Every structure is written in structure tokens, then in C-alpha cells.
Amino acid sequence: MKAFIWHVALVCFIGVVSWLFRGDLNYNDISPIVSILQNGSAMIFTIMGIWIAYIYPQAMRKVIQPSSSAIFPDEDKKRVQLLVGVIVISAVILAILLIGISMKPFLVNSSLYLKAPELFSFVGLSMLLCLVYAQLFCIYSVIASNINFITDLANKENDQKLNKKLNRTNED
């Protein structure tokens, strides 16, 4: 419920900011943001895809050889789902940017745009800020996933060291 309230509050904030600045910004003001979103999404999309294929080769093996055993351990299932979710969000961000940039020349030259340019600016700015929020979520997820991965590795290493010490004392 807290997450839902957070998202609703953020969407309201984005709406207010977009409405207040709808007439003050032009494409040159926001084009660096569009570029950063494109590059960031492409980077996250690529890196996370490679990471899944590299870290979870048994998942790839299951795709190639369907008769093999389980895809990956249950403890890794949530991590893989998060990584795939981040990849999907990054792909959606790229798709929305592509569609928006492709539609821009047609919309700007339409009679509908000439009647309500501030409405189009409001909608475009709202969409852009929502994409920025989604991208920030992806970046956070990448960082959190990497930290969790390192923490899991350290915990497994400590467990192995403890087991070795315990086995040595049991043998004595």
C-alpha cells in the first residue's frame, strides 16, 4: 500500500510540474534528457541481458536443452525476475521514446497542435518525467541487485569458511 501511495503522489507531482512548465520549455531544453534516457535504457538493457546470460548459464542451457533439470535455484528466482523486469522496463522506455520522437514532427505540424500546443507540451513533459522516474527505478534496481549479489557471495564464502572450521573441530 505504501508503494501505491508513493507512486500516486509522484504521478501527482509530475502532473503539477508538467502543468506549471508546459509553456516554458521547448524541445531544445529537454533533448538532453531524451538522449540520456535513450543511452541509459540501451545500456541497462544490454548490460542486464548479458548479466543474465553470464551469471545464469544454466537458464540458457534449459532453453537449449529442455530435457535438463531446473532452470535455476529458488533463491535466484527473484533476482532473475527483477533483472528481466528491468530489461522489459528499459525496452519499453526505448520504445516510447522512439514512438514519441517519430510522432513529434507529425504532431507539431498538425492543426490539432496549433489549437492546443500547451496541452501537447503538458502531455509530452508528463510522459518524459514518467520515463525519467522509470529509468531511475531501473538504475536503482541495477545497483541494488549488484549489491545483493555481492552480499550473497560474501555470505556464501563466510558459510564455507565456517563449515570448514566446524568440520576441522569435529574431526579433532
Image (tube, rainbow, N blue to C red):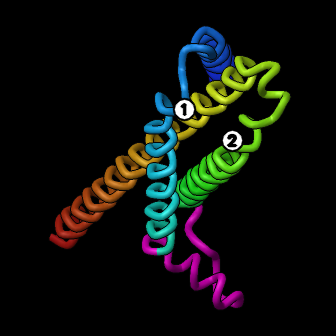
| Spatial CA span between label 1 and label 2 | 10 Å
**Mark 2 — residue?**
104
For residue 13, above or below residue 85: above
For residue 102, above or below residue 52: above
Residue 27 circle label: 1
For residue 45, above or below residue 145: below
- Judge the density around disc 1: few (<14), some (14-19), many (≥20) Cα neighbours within 10 Å: few
The image quadrant of residue 88 is bottom right
Q: Position of residue 105 (x, y in %)?
A: 69, 43
Asked which secondary structure carries label 2, the reply is: helix
Q: Position of residue 14 (x, y in %)?
A: 61, 18
Q: Is residue 164 visible?
A: yes
For the residues bearing labels 1 and 2, Cβ distance under 8 angstroms: yes
Q: Position of residue 165 (x, y in %)?
A: 19, 63
Q: For the C terminus, which image quadrant?
A: bottom left
Q: Mark 1 belongs to which amino acid?
A: Tyr
User: Residue drawn 82% across and 20% down?
Assistant: 115
Q: Is residue 5 visible?
A: no
User: Residue drawn 64% across and 76% down?
Assistant: 70
Extent of the magenta region: 54-75
Is 58 within the magenta?
A: yes
Q: Mark 2 belongs to which amino acid?
A: Lys
Residue 48 circle label: none
Left or right side of 171 for 111: right
Q: Position of residue 133 (x, y in %)?
A: 55, 32
